[in-house]
Image (cartoon, rainbow, N blue to C red):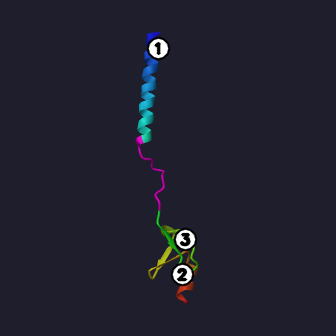
Amino acid sequence: MSRLLLLIAIVVVIYLLIRAYRKDKPRKDKKIAEDMVCCAHCGVHLPKGESIQSGGHFFCGTEHRDGYRDR
């Protein structure tokens, strides 16, 4: 009986150690926040990585970039 209790205690300790290790480890699936920019033509806000930059301004699409140049 005491061997069974000792075995259960060892399994519980190993489980808790693994759980604590996984909690401290940084996750790779977390998304990093990205800067938001404003379209110079229509004013919509979008992530900088999805925007089109031209002439120091950011745009949400090629149509707005071209429309802004015509001004």
Amino acid at pointer 3: His
Characterize the magenta stretch by its predominant secondary structure: loop
User: The disc labelled 2 sits on which kind of residue?
Assistant: Arg
Q: Is residue 24 left or right of residue 40?
A: left
> Does 26 appear in magenta?
yes
Callouts 1 and 3 close, C-beta under 8 Å = no
Helix, strand or loop status at disc 2: helix
Residue 45 numbered mark, or none: 3
Q: Position of residue 30 (x, y in %)?
A: 48, 52
Left or right, 42 with reference to 15:
right
Mark 2 and mark 1 lie on one chain; the one further toward the N terminus is: 1
Circle 2 Cα neighbour tier, 10 Å, few/some/many (<14 / 14–19 / ≥20): many
Return the mark for residue 4. 1
Residue at the spot of label 2: 65
Q: Amino acid at mark 1?
A: Leu
Name the quadrant of the C terminus: bottom right
Please give the name of the residue rendered at 47% of the width and 63% of the height, measured from the top-left corner: 34
Mark found first going from the N terminus, 1 or 3: 1
In percent of the image, x 45 and y 35: which residue is there?
19
Q: CA distance from mark 3 to mark 2?
A: 15 Å
> Which badge, 3 or 2, is on the more N-terminal residue?
3
Crowd band around label 3 with a 10 angstrom C-alpha radius: few (<14), some (14–19), many (20+) = some
Report the mark closest to the observer, 1 or 3: 3
Q: Residue at left 56%, top 81%? A: 41
Task: Give the percent coordinates (x, y) of residue 27.
Answer: 45, 47
> Residue 71 lies in magenta, yes or no?
no
Range of the magenta residues? 24-33
Q: CA distance from mark 1 to mark 3?
A: 62 Å
